[in-house]
Amino acid sequence: MFLGIDLGTSELKLLLLDEQHHIVATTGVPLTVQRPQPLWSEQQPADWWAALDQGMARLKAEHDAALAQVRGIGLSGQMHGAVALDGDGAVLRPAILWNDGRSGAQCAAMMAACPELPTITGNLAMPGFTAPKLAWMREHEPALFARVARVLLPKDWLRLQLSGEAVSEMSDAAGTLWLDVARRRWSPEALALTGLTEAHMPRLVEGSEASTTLKPELCARWGLQAGVVIAGGGGDNAASAVGMGVVKPGDGFLSLGTSGVIFLCNEAFSPNPDRAVHAFCHALPGTWHQMSVMLSAASALRWVTQTLGQPNEAALIEQVAALTPAQRQQAPIFLPYLSGERTPHNNPHAQGVFFGLTQAHGPADLGYAVLEGVGFGLLDGWQALQAGGGHADQLWLVGGGARSDWWARLLASLLDVRLVTGVGAEAGGALGAARLAWLAVGGTVAEVCRTPAVARVAEPDATLAASLRDRHARFQRLYAALRAEFG
């Protein structure tokens, strides 16, 4: 039995997996994000631990026999977050999250000071990454920065609580802007840009390696056997890839979660920073991946659903699906940049826009505009990946947004690629984390990293795609026209 822990932005998920690939149990505990100032996005690490303890108590109450058989734990989590600790391991300030946009000026300064940074790290300096957050602390919170003894990523802070050891792994570390991604080691040059050294960093392992073991007191608290191994784990997208069996060159997936991600597995380090494409290590040794990332995907659908007072996302999509093709052509254009944007714009100041509203428009029109706008943003990212040589004949579709067949058909048509939803796709990073735990205690990639059974397929519709070309071109012109107005 293996336990996957996935520390998301809106929820902490737990999953128990047996050696016949059956998901024995899942549970989730919601999390909230604090936004004390414009562009800021923070969480209290103590809330992560409280959520984990609550979830484990629930599993113990409902699945104590299964928990007692757990041999390994895997960790997955939201990437890029900065958890700054003092010499005693105390948290110095709320964690600055992946969708925080405050450090734009620091990114520009880092790029100016080290033009070769994208060559080393595979990525442009973006506010979402960890290093610019510490540069921001150095400039705006110098007293706190002077006390920083260690910087950990969110899931790795949980590992510290679970084991007492500061360890990270390659896929998550690649999103810090401190890793030499080709060599899979910390970069002294990148660290120096933020006044830090390797002594401030956790030690590194591969995601499928054993990193440490669970504290004896926690084994007793939660009813686990002594000496349970904790795998290196993975950043959320790399872990999701392992959960879907996306582990070979040419494999890929599209994730419709809080953010929107297109992930392609590579056999070599393949950076394309000019288009704001991410090039990271995969969670398995000797593999890398490329990603296009947009910061608001299913979260944009959730936002418009709540703003319009609709019962839920499914109810709004049902109204959208009832629109005629002519009505969709007359819908507003929506720029989905509710939290800034990464690929291909690298613009933390980009904002959401409805353009072309009239009194004739109602909830269905606005809902359609959001679904389409997220699709256009994903298409921009897909084109950026293709410009760097990325290609896939099909993509697995994962995340909360994968529940909608209607949206899947729209996206397949826009990207002109077959989208396949697997059985258990909603398990995402938690399943991948459990699989990485399995690998860490002796499983093989061929045995563990299977692709799931196919639940649904969305094929591209050439007629639908043709009807969207003019609207996509208008979408791109609208961003270009408004870019200077975003600040």
Image (spheres, grey):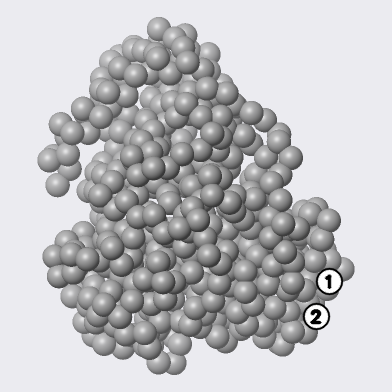
Q: Amino acid at mark 2?
A: Gln
Q: Amino acid at mark 1?
A: Gln
Left or right, residue 275 beside residue 327: left
Element at label 2: loop
Can the viewer see residue 184 in this picture?
Answer: yes
Element at label 1: loop
Residue identifier under label 2: 225
Asked which quadrant contains residue 331, the reply is: top left
Q: Closer to the camera, 173 or 373?
A: 173
| Residue at figure coordinates x 57%, y 23% from the top left | 459
Image coordinates of residue 395 in percent, x first then y, are 55, 38
Q: Residue furthest right?
A: 65
| Residue at figure coordinates x 51%, y 38% from the top left | 392
Residue identifier under label 1: 69
Q: Residue furthest bottom?
A: 88
Left or right, residue 236 beside residue 181: right
Left or right, residue 396 beside residue 357: right
Image coordinates of residue 346 in percent, x first then y, are 26, 49
| Residue at figure coordinates x 52%, y 60% from the top left | 287
Residues at marks 2 and 1, CA–CA distance in whole angstroms: 7 Å
Q: Closer to the camera, 13 or 438?
A: 438
Q: Is residue 305 above or below residue 182?
A: above
Q: Closer to the camera, 466 or 322?
A: 466
Answer yes or no: do the residues labelled 2 and 1 have beta carbons within 8 Å? yes
Image coordinates of residue 8 in percent, x first then y, are 53, 58
Image coordinates of residue 385 in percent, x first then y, are 38, 42
| Residue at figure coordinates x 39%, y 67% from the top left | 181
